[in-house]
């Protein structure tokens, strides 16, 4: 069956799902959201997940009431006999069950693909990128809430939206963080599509070209009425502008840019609207967020918000008051003059480098987890220049220890608990102990948030701990 015929078949199915057999791959947050939406429309839902029942229970991933059958602890069940396949972002398009569904002409729908359909005719603001997309989305979402009567914020960040999108007012703005894996199945683009940056990431799953193409996909279906917000400082991202029918807004932290967009100029963040009017939003020193990477996030958020027509006053208020999201350079507390910081979100060397550059004082760096086959040369240089020591732990611990051992004092331990203990012994008053692992959590924790929470709990057990001020 051709792709056009498959899309037509999906349209008919989505219009009437009553008594239709549907399989949902993955019992994760997106899978459960899909299952509830399908059940509410009368579909007969089967769910399949490769994790064991014990692993799913530990993650709190239970099938919603009404699911006919759940198959876990084995490869995804075959799609044969189902009218529709619904997938979470964790299920790659290259998975054999998806290839099998396509060969059988069975429509495949993802949560993000469905969400973009259901959002029409509401205005959608979508944000992707290798780093910074969560913070940028949170900033834009808060600016939107101060500017509009109705706003929904979600996607890869926050609670799932399928249960809320259809009851949201038609004048609502929908602000979405969109990951590269969520873009795999999309066939629509947001009205305002932003890309913060594109740097090496997830090369354990995709080639570099495949990864870049997925990020570019956020703008693939834009029209002349739409807006693309692109990072002029990043050569990959800025290259996405070529051939776009949409209006391009640019962002930069290196000085003024031509046309509409936002930039850092000396000590201030400025925006230029489509009519050429330039406004100074706020001085950079007014930001509560730490680090040059967060200056870039603030500039990008200002551009997106200005493109959406939100008032400059609301942009300035949010940028000046926003303290950041959990597990992103979050201060846990101090122990005998040593500050402990949770940056568990840093699952790539690039993000760890940005974290290291956010501190003036000596750092005891905690590195480890499951690595993604990413280059370590720049991390090695940065750690050598800024760290008193590096404590390497987990599955990737030996790899990090080998990469850094000639540039900084390196200690290898088996797990995070041991890493916190050794870091406490190595740190001196005035130092920062920084969990910025440069790897995923999946060797020991279900996600970066669980790892960050474990780190905070371990730090709180250290003698002399004092909680960070709210």
Image (cartoon, rainbow, N blue to C red):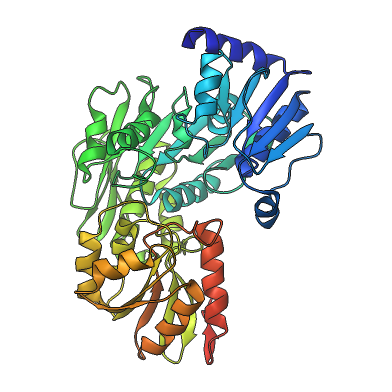
Nearest to the observer: residue 96 or residue 307: 96
Does residue 291 sit above or below 132 in this rendering? Answer: below
Does residue 173 sit above or below 256 in this rendering? Answer: above
Q: Residue at x 44, y 28 (%)?
A: 191
In the rendered image, residue 114, in percent from the top left (x then y), is placed at 58, 27
In the rendered image, residue 109, in percent from the top left (x then y), is placed at 57, 25
Q: Splitting the image into 4 quarters, where does residue 454 fall?
A: bottom right
Quadrant of the image containing the C terminus: bottom right
Label count reads 0
Determine if residue 120 is in view. Answer: no
Q: Residue at x 56, y 14 (%)?
A: 104
Q: Splitting the image into 4 quarters, where does residue 298 fall?
A: bottom left
Determine if residue 340 is in view. Answer: yes
Q: Is residue 202 left or right of residue 154?
A: left
Nearest to the observer: residue 372 or residue 12: 372
Q: Is residue 195 left or right of residue 322?
A: left
In the rendered image, residue 230, in percent from the top left (x then y), is placed at 29, 38
Q: Residue at x 45, y 73 (%)?
A: 414
In the rendered image, residue 112, in percent from the top left (x then y), is placed at 54, 32
Residue at the front extreme, as displayed: 74
């Amino acid at each position: 069956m051709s792709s056009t015929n498959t899309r037509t078949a999906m349209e008919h199915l989505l219009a009437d799902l009553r008594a239709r057999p549907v399989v949902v791959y993955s019992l994760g947050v997106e899978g459960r959201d899909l299952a509830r939406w399908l059940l509410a429309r009368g579909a007969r839902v089967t769910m399949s997940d490769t994790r064991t029942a014990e692993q799913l229970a530990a993650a709190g991933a239970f099938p919603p009431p009404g699911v006919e059958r759940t198959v876990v602890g084995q490869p995804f069940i075959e799609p044969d006999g189902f009218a529709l396949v619904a997938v979470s972002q964790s299920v790659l398009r290259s998975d054999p069950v998806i290839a099998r569904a396509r060969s059988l002409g069975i429509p495949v729908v993802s949560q993000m693909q469905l969400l973009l359909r259901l959002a029409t005719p509401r205005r959608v603001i979508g944000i992707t990128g290798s780093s910074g997309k969560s913070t940028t989305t949170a900033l834009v979402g808060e600016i939107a809430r101060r500017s509009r009567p109705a706003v929904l914020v979600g996607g890869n960040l926050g609670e799932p939206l399928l249960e809320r999108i259809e009851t949201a007012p038609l004048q609502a703005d929908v602000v979405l963080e969109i990951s590269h894996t969520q873009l795999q199945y999309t066939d629509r683009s947001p009205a305002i599509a932003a890309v913060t940056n594109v740097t090496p990431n997830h090369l354990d799953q995709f080639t570099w070209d495949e990864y870049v193409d997925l990020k570019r996909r956020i703008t693939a279906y834009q029209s002349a009425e739409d807006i693309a917000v692109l990072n002029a400082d990043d050569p990959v991202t800025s290259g996405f502008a070529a051939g776009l029918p949409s209006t391009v807004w640019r962002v930069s932290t290196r000085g003024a840019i031509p046309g509409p967009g936002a930039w850092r100029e000396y000590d201030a963040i400025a925006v230029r609207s489509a009519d050429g009017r330039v406004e100074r939003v706020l001085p950079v020193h007014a930001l509560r967020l730490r680090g040059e990477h967060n200056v870039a996030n603030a500039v990008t958020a200002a551009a997106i918000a200005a493109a959406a027509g939100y008032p400059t006053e609301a942009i300035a208020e949010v940028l000046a008051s926003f303290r950041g999201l959990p597990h992103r350079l979050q201060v846990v507390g101090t122990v005998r003059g040593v500050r402990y910081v949770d940056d568990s979100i840093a699952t790539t060397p690039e993000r760890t480098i940005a974290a290291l550059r956010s501190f003036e004082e000596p750092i005891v760096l905690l590195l480890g987890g499951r690595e993604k086959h990413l280059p370590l040369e720049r991390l090695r240089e940065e750690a050598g220049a800024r760290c008193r020591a590096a404590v390497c732990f987990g599955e990737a611990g030996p790899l990090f220890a080998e990469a850094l051992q000639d540039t900084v004092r390196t200690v290898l331990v088996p797990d995070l608990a041991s890493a916190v203990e050794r870091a406490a012994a190595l740190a001196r008053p005035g130092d920062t102990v920084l969990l910025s692992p440069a790897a995923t959590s999946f060797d020991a924790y279900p996600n970066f948030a669980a790892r960050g929470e474990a780190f905070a709990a371990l730090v709180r057990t250290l003698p002399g701990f004092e909680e960070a001020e709210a």
